[in-house]
Amino acid sequence: MRVLGLSGSPRLGGNSDTLLHEAIRGAKDKGAETHVIYLSDLDIGHCPACDDCFYTGECRYRDDMDEVISQMEKADRIIVSSPIHFMGVSSQLKVMIDRCQSLWARKYKLKTPPLGDDRERKGMFVAAGGMKNGDVFEGARATMRAFFAVLNVKYTYELLISGVDNLGAIQTQSDTLKKAYELGQMLAEK
C-alpha cells in the first residue's frame, strides 16, 4: 500500500499541514509506504489551456508537475491537505489541480485510465480554515470532489476543521489530531 500526501499549504507546519502529517503517520503505522510532496516547494507553472494534452494525454510543459503525476500514478491512496483561502483551496494546490488537465484529457478525450491503470484508489481531503461559517468548506470540497473524480480516486474521507487560523492552533485540538491519525489508518486499509 502506497499513500501519497499532497500538502497544499504555503505554511509548512501550519494547521492543514499538521493534519496531513497526522494522517500520514496513521497510514505509516498501519504499514503503508508513505511519501509527502510539498507543493509550495515546487516549480509548477499555470495551465496555459493550449489543449495539446487533448491529443497526447501529456502536458507539453516540463516542470515539477511531472514528478507529481508520477507519484500519483504510483499511489494507491492520496491525501490532499489545504488551508482554506477565500472559501477555496490554496493557490499552490489549485495550480497543481489545474495542471491535471492532461489527466482529464486522458480520461475524457483519449478514454484511457488517467493514472495509467484501473486499480482502486481512494482519497482523503484534509483542510483547516479560520472562519467558523458553516459553508466555509463548500468551494474547496467541490474542487476536491471534481479532482478525485477526474483521477478515478474514490473520495473516501474528509476532515474539515474550522475556527483554526493562527499558526499551531490545531495543536490544542488533541481529538482532531487523533481523528486525522485514525482516518489515515483507515485509508491505508485494503
Image (tube, rainbow, N blue to C red):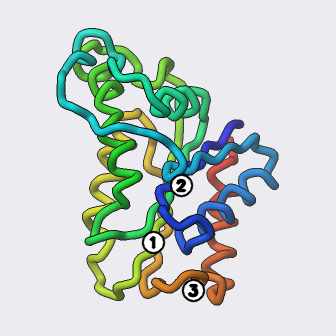
Residue 169's label in the rendered image is 3
Question: For this rendering, which residue is in front, 176 or 49?
Answer: 49
Image quadrant in which the N terminus is located: top right
SS at circle 3: helix
The answer to whether residue 120 is seen in the rendering is no
Q: Is residue 148 left or right of residue 66?
A: left
Q: CA distance from mark 2 to mark 3?
A: 18 Å
Image quadrant in which the C terminus is located: top right
Give the percent coordinates (x, y) of residue 6: 54, 49
Dot 3 surroundings within 10 Å: few (below 14), some, or many (20 or more)? few
Mark 3 or 1, nearer chain start: 1
Which residue is found at the position 55% from the left and 44% from the top? 78
Dot 1 surroundings within 10 Å: few (below 14), some, or many (20 or more)? many
Quadrant of residue 84 within the rendered picture: bottom left
Mark whose residue sits in front, 2 or 1: 2
Dot 2 surroundings within 10 Å: few (below 14), some, or many (20 or more)? many
Q: CA distance from mark 3 to mark 1?
A: 14 Å
Give the percent coordinates (x, y) of residue 178: 69, 75
The vertical placement of 79 against 130, above or below, is above
Residue 174's label in the rendered image is none
The answer to whether residue 28 is seen in the rendering is yes
Mark 2 or 3, nearer chain start: 2
Mark 2 or 1, nearer chain start: 2
SS at circle 1: strand
Task: Kindly indicate whether the residue at mark 1 contacts the one at mark 3 (C-beta within 8 angstroms).
Answer: no
**Amino acid under disc 1:** Leu
Give the percent coordinates (x, y) of residue 56: 31, 10
Which residue is found at the position 40% from the left and 51% from the top? 93
Reading the image, the residue beneath label 1 is: 160
Q: Is residue 79 left or right of residue 34?
A: left
Q: CA distance from mark 2 to mark 1?
A: 15 Å
Reading the image, the residue beneath label 2 is: 7
